Amino acid sequence: MGHSTKLPALAAILAAGILAGCSQVIPPHLLPLPAQAKALLAKKDMREDAPIFVRIFKQESELEVWKAKADGRYYHFKTYPICTFSGSLGPKFMEGDLQSPEGFYKVAARQMNPKSQFHLSFNLGFPNAYDRANGRTGTFLMVHGDCKSIGCYAMTDVLIEEIYALAREAFAGGQKAFDVQAFPFRMTPANMKKFRRHEAYNFWRNNLLQGYRAFEETQLPPKVDFCEKRYVINANFVNGPPANAAAACPKYEPLMVKAMPRAPISRAAGAGAPGTNVANRPATSAASQATIGGGGMFGFAPATPSVAGFAFRANSRLSR
């Protein structure tokens, strides 16, 4: 009798131990979103599997994640402190210069690395067409964990796990690729004036500033093209997109996108800041709008179950 009463208790202890052991061996790339992140998503009325958009600011050492809502616009979800990055303000030029890149990049599921030597990572896709047209070189430029950087943006392991999970769920929800905008600083008029004598100022003014303002005004990731060795933002090419980033730009018209509605008090308080006092622009055609915002201006893929087991194919070319 005494022996039989001990068996259930022993079984319970063993079961608890097994469950605890299982919870400890979940690989980092399969970890669910933390409870606090889930609560914040619910508070902000955001879906876990909604598309994401990322901005990086060197001077402020911050990485922002924005999430799409049903109106197609992106709303701020959370700002994460960057643990460290390589180099200083200014773009990356060549392999080995230990400089973190600045520019506009896209990250697809194949660029996610669950087996990174820096805990978890995703490849920014440097060099992009602009970088290549300007002779810039480099490989394995990542956002990753481990708080160590060799030309990358490094987060703590805990933070990269959360950011990775947000990307994983967005891919599971149907997003094909998310945009990453990497800036030297928040490109306000005050900052542009402050850094006007920096050697990279012309690059910032002629290539990055328009993309920064486009998102500030619309809260839609801008359409980015490449020609004449420069970025071209929100352009509607009349006879098709540029075939060569180094060649002359084909004929194009501005892709008109309606600015994000702002409350009058916001416009008054933020006078002079990009996007705070810009009158609404005429909306473009539905066909043109569909090229902005990650696959559609309004709405996104139907809800799918959150899948903590959604895995990415390990890519040996993205070994860092």
Image (cartoon, helix red, strand yellow):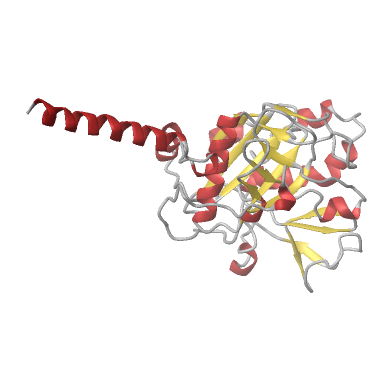
Classify residue 103 by image quadrant: top right
Q: Is residue 250 left or right of residue 80?
A: right
Q: Is residue 57 left or right of residue 48?
A: right
Residue at 59%, 31% in the rendered image: 157
Which quarter of the picture shows residue 160? top right
Q: Is any atom of residue 182 visible in this view?
A: yes
Image coordinates of residue 124 in percent, x first then y, are 72, 46
Q: Is residue 74 visible?
A: no
Compared to residue 156, the image places residue 291 above or below, namely below
Q: Give coordinates of residue 112: x percent, y percent.
A: 63, 49
Residue at 67%, 51% in the rendered image: 111
- Image spot of residue 250 (x, y percent): 85, 67
Q: Nearer the viewer, residue 5 or 228?
A: 5
- The extreme bottom residue here reads 239
Numbered circles on residues, count:
0
Q: Is residue 153 above or below residue 169?
A: above
